[in-house]
Amino acid sequence: MKYLLLSLSLLLTLPLAQAQNVAFKIATLAPDGSSWMTAMRAGAETIAQHTDGRVSFRFYPGGIMGNDRSVLRRIRVGQLHGGAITGGGLSEVLPESQVYSLPFLFRDYAEVDAVRAQIDPVLSSALHDKGFVSFGISEGGFAYLLSNSPIRRMGDLSGHKIWIPEGDALSRGAFETTGISPVPLPLTDVLTGLQTGLIDTVAGSPTGVIALQWHTRTAYLTETPLMYLYGSMIIQRRAFERLSPADQRVVKEVMEGIFRELDRDIREDNQQAMAALQQQGIQFVQSEVADITQWRKLVEENNDRLIAAGLFEQGILQQLRQHLTMHRENPPAQ
């Protein structure tokens, strides 16, 4: 009997003996004090409490570790374990992660919600296969064009110096269909570009343009959504699996819960930010329906050419388009 009790005692203590103390180093562009960082720090505290301090997080906010590409490079060489990466940045790990940000893909948030309910798990699984654990997608909101003169039709873009993120082939293609050669810049250089006149037109979410002060250098917002913005916090799977199964469950439950809250809260924040932009003097303009329909058609044709040329595998996009078509043909009852 004593040998049985000794064996049971060893089995009960084995998980604790194997558990490792892990301090995850996570980088993000979100500034310290932002709602995102506040939520992440609260989540880290909860995780530390529920793992008796075995799991902790050290955050590097405000882009001090560089842009998405720099963060991913630091993850690969072991300087970081993970980061909050935008949909475009994730394309270096999983090219198909760009599907939500195809220009003019979504017309409203009802379409976003219908598609994401089906495709979010597919993207999470694909990231896992690529060696990363994702804790969910956090909405950034729709990006809108802001400029110093009203943009209602494609022809209004002529003569404008339009910013696009570095390496963003989809955005480049969207503007090149109108005969415009956009100006690629890192996010950190956009405000300076507006101040110096290097660029005069940007696209961003309402919360983003206020946080980054872009609205102080523009006067008009075109109300047609240009593209959908989003991001995810990812941790290298090899590092995450150093945790015991019990600690892995704690981290996933806490962080996935936080991302669900952020996803909801950011949409509300963007609605409030739209009202704030109007109050601060930004004039909202409507696109001409026939013209925007033509631009949407040209962009979709260009997207198909890029994808056919190998921008990313078409499987996830085909699933997305099927769900989007189903939603448009059978919209939920109001």
Image (spheres, rainbow, N blue to C red):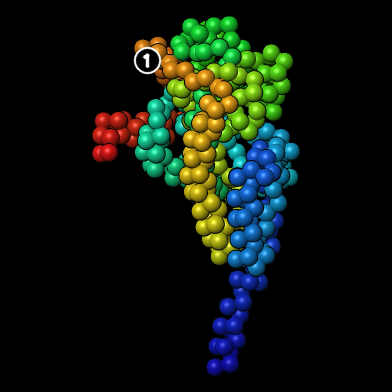
| Residue 305 placement: quadrant | top left
Query: For this view, does 288 lie left or right of residue 151?
Result: left
Q: Nearer the viewer, residue 191 or 325?
A: 191
Q: Measuring 48% from the left and 35% from the top, which residue is drawn there? A: 271
Quadrant in which the N terminus is drawn: bottom right
Q: Residues within 10 Å of mark 1 (few under 14, many from 20)?
A: few
Q: Measuring 61% from the left and 48% from the top, which residue is drawn there? A: 235
Q: Nearer the viewer, residue 219 or 253?
A: 219
Whole-percent x, y for residue 10 in the image = 61, 80
| Residue 324 placement: quadrant | top left
Q: Measuring 60% from the left and 45% from the top, which residue is drawn there? A: 35
280 is higher (above) or lower (below) than 128: above
Count of numbered labels shown in the rendering: 1
| Residue 12 placement: quadrant | bottom right
Q: Disc 1 residue type?
A: Val
Q: Nearer the viewer, residue 269 or 127?
A: 269
According to the picture, the residue beneath numbered tag 1 turns out to be: 289
Q: Secondary structure at mark 1?
A: helix
| Residue 56 seen by the camera | yes
127 is higher (above) or lower (below) than 256: above
177 is higher (above) or lower (below) than 245: above
Q: Nearer the viewer, residue 318 or 200?
A: 200
Query: For this view, does 315 lie left or right of residue 54?
Result: left
Whole-percent x, y for residue 250 in the image = 55, 61
Q: Measuring 64% from the left and 52% from the top, which residue is drawn there? A: 41
Query: For this view, does 41 lie left or right of residue 220?
Result: right
Whole-percent x, y for residue 302 in the image = 45, 16
Quadrant in which the C terminus is drawn: top left
